[in-house]
Amino acid sequence: MKKIIALLVASVVAMGVLAGCGSTGQGNTDPANTAGSAGAEASDEKAVYRTLDEIKESGTITIGVFSDKNPFGYVDENGKYQGYDVYFAERIGEDLGVEVEYVSTDAANRVEYLKSGKVDIILANFTVTEERAESVDFALPYMKVALGVVSPDSALITDVEQLNGKKLIVTKGTTAETYFSENYPEIELVKFDQYTEAYNALLDGRGDAFSTDNTEVLAWALLNEGFTVGIESIGNLDTIAPAVSKGNETLLNWINDEIVALADEEFFHADYKATLEPVYGTAVDIDSLVVEGGVVE
């Protein structure tokens, strides 16, 4: 890595160009540089990020969200980002006094987008795990989640043992992939990069069932006749939280303070009613999902 840095420095000096590539734990030397253009190479030793002051000075915060995971993060017919995570992202931009620049992310590249400085925050239905916490810093949670399994009504899966000898669809980089790989290695996993691909595979019969967050499959089954979530909860009860680059304490602390402050107005209950209730209706207890003030009850 030292050789690579030396070569880069020599090249810059030779061209007489001064280029900023984002913070390496000490703050960006070019405050005007945005995270969207700060896709600098990051090593395992150093995280690339912009501090809170740098974000404010730039006037833009870059947030990674899903573009194909309705109702949590998706692009509507007008090309605009919508969903539960996007509702929160808009409030972050408003309270910081900056514009929000959205970056579409897949489940598998959420960590890398933070480590490389491509985004300032990940708000993409990101489940907190010990493994991920080694690479990124999680803020306080704003949602509870477990895994669920959706399958066709004609061959409904209601018990994990029924998956033996069958194909289970998962999305790469998700907790579902990790959980079934570690706990049920005998189950054949059919893996896809994007949620849209995974759901299309289920619709096309290229798998017998699909597993991801139970909040997601419950919403999808309500919108797709002929499919039911036969296993509504499997694995641990986990939490969903924003994530920032490892060591970005100024941004992390601001997000934590924001989540605590928003509890006074029950912000995430309002978020749920605006984005999730139109899908779930009264089928799901709001308090079984929503977390206010970062306090899991």
Image (cartoon, rainbow, N blue to C red):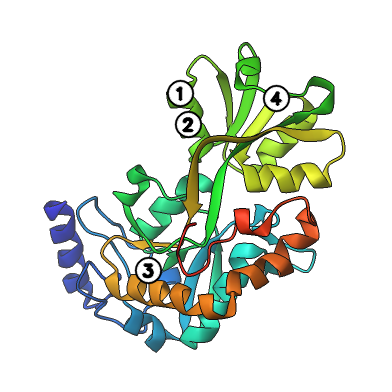
Q: Nearer the viewer, mark 4 or mark 2?
A: 4
Q: Secondary structure at mark 2?
A: helix
Image location (x, y in percent) of residue 100 = 54, 77
Q: Are marks 1 and 4 in contact (CB under 8 Å)?
A: no
Image location (x, y in percent) of residue 63 = 50, 68
Left or right for 103, reference 111: right
Choose between 80 and 125: the one closer to the eye. 125
Q: Secondary structure at mark 1?
A: helix
Q: Are marks 2 and 1 in contact (CB under 8 Å)?
A: yes
Residue 179's disc is 2
CA–CA distance in space, label 1 to label 4:
17 Å
Q: Nearer the viewer, mark 2 or mark 3?
A: 2
Q: Are marks 4 and 2 in contact (CB under 8 Å)?
A: no
Left or right for 239, reference 155: left
Farthest residue in the top direction? 165
The amino acid sitting under disc 2 is: Tyr
Q: Which residue is mark 1?
A: 183
Q: Which residue is mark 4?
A: 158
Total numbered labels placed on residues in the image: 4
Q: Nearer the viewer, mark 1 or mark 3?
A: 1
Residue at image location 51% in from the left, 33% down from the top: 177
Choose between 109 and 220: the one closer to the eye. 220
Image location (x, y in percent) of residue 93 = 52, 80
CA–CA distance in space, label 1 to label 3:
39 Å
CA–CA distance in space, label 2 to label 3:
33 Å
CA–CA distance in space, label 4 to label 2:
17 Å
Q: Which residue is mark 3?
A: 38
Quarter location, residue 139: bottom left
Say if residue 92 shows up in the picture.
Answer: no
The amino acid sitting under disc 3 is: Ala
Image location (x, y in percent) of residue 227 = 80, 34
